[in-house]
Amino acid sequence: MPPNTDDKIFFLEREREILQLLYDGLTSKQIGTKLFISCRTVEDYRQQLMEKSGYPQRS
């Protein structure tokens, strides 16, 4: 499925925060440390961001 280009995507505040940190080049572990959450939680957010934006799953 191609990226979602037709509809606006609304992200939660935490999702936007994580998205910005990913854009800045931080790893999941670095993001988790910075936000006081587990690396697994960051990965869950990353997956939610991918699903919301319409990108296929990473393998």
Image (cartoon, rainbow, N blue to C red):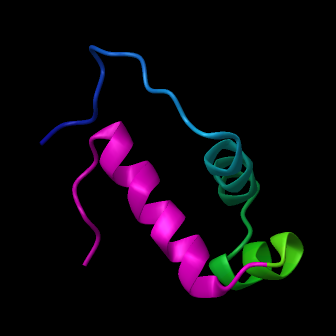
Picture coordinates of residue 18 (x, y %)?
68, 56
Picture coordinates of residue 46 (x, y %)?
49, 63
Whether the magenta-drawn stretch holds residue 49 is answered as: yes
Return the residue nearer the eye: 51 or 2.
51
> Among all residues in the image, which is located at the extreme right?
34
Whether the magenta-drawn stretch holds residue 44 is answered as: yes
Q: Which residue is drawn at 25% across and 79% down?
A: 59
Q: Is residue 11 above or below residue 46?
A: above
Return the residue nearer the eye: 31 or 25.
31
In the image, the segment drawn in magenta is: 37-59
Q: Residue at x 52, y 62 (%)?
A: 45
Position of 29 with respect to 48 (left or right) is right
Q: Quadrant of residue 27?
A: bottom right
Q: Quadrant of residue 22?
A: bottom right
> Among all residues in the image, which is located at the extreme left?
1
Magenta-drawn stretch, dominant element (helix, strand or loop): helix
